[in-house]
Amino acid sequence: MARDNKGFVCHNHTSMVSYEIHHVWPQGYHGPNIASNKIKICPNAHSDIHFLMELILKGKPYNHHHFGPAILRYAKLGAEQVMAYGESLLPVVS
């Protein structure tokens, strides 16, 4: 369904007509606005990544076969970064 090719993720387009910039670690979750945190993505894939990432963060079930491997990878990566950031804010108990 989705493919990953040198920095862009797209839904079955032979060429990307329009794209959006997706922050893998979303800025809404304190992700940095730096080049290494950005990918070019078609609007449909962008929506799917955010939808799936929210399901993952909320611990809700999802059918991973419904999403392509690139969508799943970026959603999981974003969720992992959000969780790691949240854990870094917890007080250290000794």
Image (cartoon, helix red, strand yellow):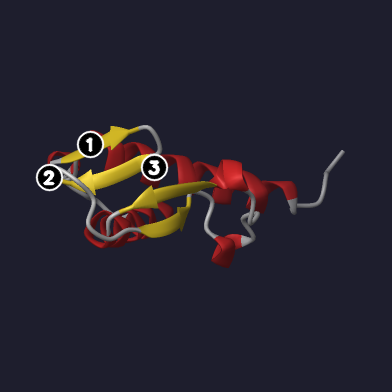
Looking at the rendered structure, the secondary structure element under dot 3 is helix
- Measuring from the top left, give residue 59's x and y in whole percent: 37, 53
What separation in Å lies between label 1 and label 3 (alpha carbons)?
Answer: 12 Å
Looking at the rendered structure, the secondary structure element under dot 2 is loop
- Measuring from the top left, give residue 2's x and y in whole percent: 19, 41
Q: Earlier in the sequence, mark 1 or mark 3?
A: 1
In this view of the protein, which residue sits in the foreground, 41 or 56? 41
Q: Earlier in the sequence, mark 3 or mark 2?
A: 2
What separation in Å lies between label 3 and label 2 (alpha carbons)?
Answer: 17 Å
Q: Is residue 41 above or below residue 36?
A: below
- Measuring from the top left, give residue 80's x and y in whole percent: 51, 42
Question: In this figure, which residue is indicated by the disc labeled 2?
Answer: 12
State whether residue 47 appears in this view.
Answer: yes
Looking at the rendered structure, the secondary structure element under dot 1 is strand
Q: Quadrant of residue 51?
A: bottom left
Q: Is residue 91 left or right of residue 55?
A: right
Q: Which mark is residue 92?
A: none
In this view of the protein, which residue sits in the foreground, 12 or 31? 12
Question: In this figure, which residue is indicated by the disc labeled 3?
Answer: 74
Q: Amino acid at mark 3?
A: Tyr
| Label 2 neighbour load within 10 Å: few <14, some 14-19, many 20+ | few
Q: Is residue 11 left or right of residue 41?
A: left
Q: Which mark is residue 3?
A: 1
Q: Amino acid at mark 1?
A: Arg
Question: Mark 2 and mark 1 in contact (Cβ < 8 Å)?
Answer: yes
In this view of the protein, which residue sits in the foreground, 94 or 43? 43
Q: Residue at x 35, y 42 (%)?
A: 8
Q: Residue at x 64, y 50 (%)?
A: 34
Q: Earlier in the sequence, mark 1 or mark 2?
A: 1
Q: Quadrant of residue 18?
A: bottom left
State whether residue 58 appears in this view.
Answer: no
Q: Say which quadrant the C terminus sits in.
A: top right
